[in-house]
Image (cartoon, helix red, strand yellow):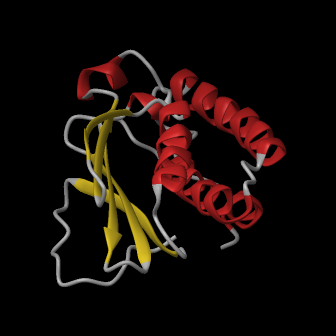
């Protein structure tokens, strides 16, 4: 999942993942669908209007006690662009947070799932179940090896979950 093209410079202490979706409209029903998806994923909306939605999830200190990627300090911005497309970007602050390739894949899979949910009403439930089992195994290895193992995501898993 690549970021939409722009002239922005990405700071080294940030991880960004995003998408642009061509939608016929962004009416009340679509806004509700978008908010419902992200709220179910743990985000709390702090600003909403017709064209811009900002949400937050997690906090940097939570990753000291949890390997759950949903605890990462994450900001979500959804913007309705020019009446044609919805741009949705997650920004993760990497400073002072433990993040592995598996955590980054979690965030990418969330964005992929968001796309399929908005376009086809598909939340990829069975794929998520498998991913979360593999993520739990990687987190266990990471903890038991004191961060030496469990960081990297095998190529076959990247193909399976992220199609890359």
Q: Residue at (68%, 61%) from the top-left corner?
A: 116
Q: Residue at (37%, 78%) from the top-left corner?
A: 83
Q: Looking at the image, how many numbered discs can be counted on the residues? A: 0
Residue 117 shows in the view: yes
Q: Residue 69: image x %, image y %?
A: 47, 35
Q: Residue 68: image x %, image y %?
A: 50, 28
Task: Name the residue furthest front.
Answer: 28
Instruction: Please give left or right for residue 6 compared with residue 105 in the image.
Output: left
Q: Residue at (35%, 35%) from the top-left corner?
A: 98
Instruction: Please give left or right for residue 41 compared with residue 164 in the image.
Output: left
Q: Residue 100: image x %, image y %?
A: 46, 45
Residue 102 shows in the view: no
Q: Is residue 67 above or below residue 164?
A: above
Q: Residue at (18%, 84%) from the top-left corner?
A: 7
Q: Residue 36: image x %, image y %?
A: 53, 38
Task: Name the residue furthest top.
Answer: 65
Res 74 → quadrant = top left
Q: Observer-nearest residue: 149 or 82?
A: 82
Q: Observer-nearest residue: 160 or 156?
A: 160
Instruction: Please give left or right for residue 13 compared with residue 156 in the image.
Output: left
Q: Is residue 49 above or below residue 134?
A: below
Q: Observer-nearest residue: 133 or 4?
A: 4
Which quadrant does the C terminus fall into? bottom right
Res 139 → quadrant = top right
């Amino acid at each position: 999942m690549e970021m939409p093209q722009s002239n922005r410079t990405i700071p080294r202490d940030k991880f960004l993942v995003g998408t642009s979706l061509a939608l016929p409209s962004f009416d009340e029903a679509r806004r509700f669908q978008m908010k419902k998806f992200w709220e179910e994923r743990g985000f709390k909306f702090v600003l909403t209007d017709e064209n811009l939605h900002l949400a937050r999830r997690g906090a940097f200190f939570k990753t000291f006690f949890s390997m759950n990627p949903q605890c990462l300090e994450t900001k979500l911005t959804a913007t309705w662009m020019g009446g044609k497309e919805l741009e949705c970007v997650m920004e993760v602050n990497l400073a002072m947070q433990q993040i592995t390739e598996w955590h980054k894949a979690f965030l990418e899979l969330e964005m992929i799932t968001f796309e399929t949910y908005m376009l086809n009403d598909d939340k990829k439930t069975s794929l998520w179940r498998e991913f979360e089992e593999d993520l739990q195994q990687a987190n266990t290895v990471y903890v038991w090896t004191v961060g030496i193992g469990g960081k990297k995501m095998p190529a076959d898993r990247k193909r399976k979950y992220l199609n890359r």
